[in-house]
Amino acid sequence: KTTPKKKRMEKIEESGYDEHLLIGREESELIEGLDRCLKAEIWEEAQKQVWLAGPLVAVSLLQFCIQIISIMFVGHLGELPLSSASIATSFASVTGASVLNGMGSALETLCGQCYGAKQYKMLGIYTQR
């Protein structure tokens, strides 16, 4: 049993509206082939980046483990020392690490600008501060 919707869909399929409008069939097949090649290149690049980022991820996890292990040791002393150490660790992470990361990011920008402008004296001053 054919419904009006099925009839419309059959007409669309017969007329060839499923092809790209601005390019022909040969160009469409070429683009599909390029998409497959591009996907392979993206996959290869992603594998390389994961391989290169592995040590960075390992260091981050180990640094996080230092805090967790410290908190676990303090947890053996009781609830009050555990809560105090947890709050202190959180406060130190938020205030200290965030400020230092922000200053490091700003220094990276300033040093890059100085190097690009060949202002090596200012580059030295920024790195010594």
Image (cartoon, grey):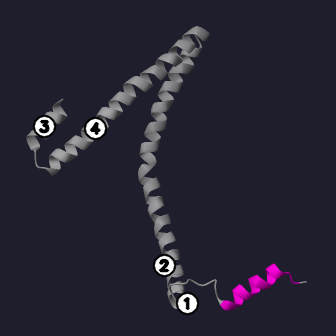
The answer to whether the residues at label 1 and label 2 have Cβ atoms under 8 Å apart is no
In the image, which disc is placed on residue 106?
4
Q: Residue at x 53, y 85 (%)?
A: 28
Residue 24 in the image: state x and y as whole percent: 52, 89
Q: What residue type is labelled 1?
A: Arg
Q: Nearer the viewer, mark 1 or mark 3?
A: 1
Work out whether 109 lies above or below 21: above
Element under disc 1: helix
Q: Which of marks 1 and 2 is in front?
A: 1
Q: Residue at x 45, y 32 (%)?
A: 63
Lower sequence index among marks 4 and 1: 1
Q: Residue at x 56, y 20 (%)?
A: 72
Q: Could you say which quadrant of the image residue 14 lies in? A: bottom right
Which residue position is annotated with label 1?
A: 25
Q: Quadrant of the C terminus?
A: top left
Lower sequence index among marks 3 and 4: 4
Which residue position is annotated with label 2?
A: 34
Q: Which amino acid does label 3 sit on?
A: Gly
Lower sequence index among marks 3 and 2: 2
Q: Is residue 107 visible?
A: yes
Q: Would residue 3 be counted in the magenta stretch?
A: yes
Lower sequence index among marks 2 and 4: 2
Alpha-carbon span between mark 1 and mark 2: 14 Å
Alpha-carbon span between mark 4 and mark 1: 52 Å
Per the picture, the main secondary structure of the magenta-coloured stretch is: helix
Q: Would residue 73 be counted in the magenta stretch?
A: no
Crowd band around label 4 with a 10 angstrom C-alpha radius: few (<14), some (14–19), many (20+):
few
Start-end of magenta stretch: 2-15
Q: Which amino acid does label 4 sit on?
A: Ala
Element under disc 4: helix
Which residue position is annotated with label 3?
A: 124
In the visual, does 93 lie left or right of 7?
left
